[in-house]
Amino acid sequence: MSWSIALVCEAPADRRTAVRLTTRVVCDHESVRDWMQPEYLQFRGYRPEDEQLLWREVKTTAIANNVSVIGFINGLPVSPDAHNALRALILFNRLDPRPDAVMLIRDSDDDLERRDGLHQARDAEPWKFKVVIGFAHTKRECWHICGFEPKDEDERQRLENERQHLGFDPRTRSHELTAKHDPKNDKRSAKRVLSVLTADDFDREGECLTAIAVLHDRGEENGLRAFLEELRTILVPMFTQ
């Protein structure tokens, strides 16, 4: 028993975040928790052996497989990322067998219109699989930051130092952090803040995604709440049909 879930994301780190959240939400859901196991969820890229399809590889993969996307979508001008997301969905739609679901995971990088583009692509066709959108504002690091809870005095001090340095609690206002890739010169860099809070510990970073209720509460502005809702309302029903 297994379900195939294709992932389109920017980097392996985004895959780890999406997989961890998806597995947690699905396996803990009251409708399936009695029998669902993490190994039943098989995450993949375009090819079954790939772990993910990277956004930067979508267009070249589409060209190699004679997928062409141009012009308006459903008669409307396209928003950023709409064409690339549509290419990815067409690629997966042509596979035999198709995945059971496709997840489009994207950072806003301070461009909220990207979210409109992902929705345009999802609404372009009655796809033969579920399509789940995970849109992190401004970066996927913000999702981890909002779930950070100090475990000891050292972590409490790190959080307090960041509060004073930033002038606000980064956990509740993570969406105000920036997407800049210049941690040394931008104190509001989401990457810098997460690095400081977790001391560059990948395991600790992952632990920040444990308390789903906390993530839901703090995730309205950074896109995490919407992603959790999509997992519950779009993905989970797939296992109960």
Image: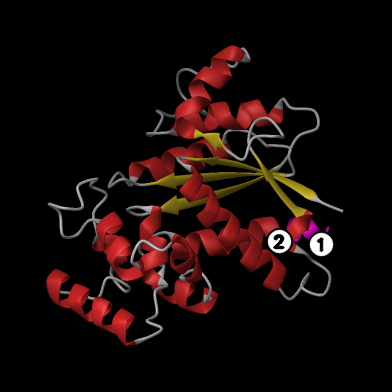
Relative image position of residue 205 (x, y in whole percent): 44, 65
| Residue 65 falls within the magenta-colored stretch | no
Q: Is residue 25 left or right of residue 116?
A: right
Q: CA distance from mark 1 to mark 2?
A: 7 Å
Q: Label 1 sits on what residue type?
A: Thr
Circles 1 and 2 in contact, beta carbons < 8 Å: yes
Q: Which residue carries the number 2 mark?
A: 236
Residue 216 percent coordinates (x, y): 48, 72
The residue shown at (46%, 70%) is: 208
**Nearest the camera: 212 or 74?**
212
Q: 152 and 11: which one is in front?
A: 152
Q: Within the image, what quadrant is residue 141 found in? A: bottom left
**166 on left or right of 43:** left
Q: Nearer the viewer, residue 110 or 37?
A: 37
- The residue that appears at 80% across and 28% down in the rendered structure is 96
- Asked if residue 238 is among those painted magenta in the image, a careful observer would answer yes
Range of residues picked out in magenta: 237-241
Q: Secondary structure at mark 2?
A: helix
Callout 2: few (<14), some (14-19), or many (20+) C-alpha neighbours within 10 Å?
some
**Above or below, 170 relative to 114:** below
Which disc, if any, is residue 240? 1
- Disc 1, SS: loop
Q: Residues within 10 Å of mark 1 (few under 14, many from 20)?
A: few
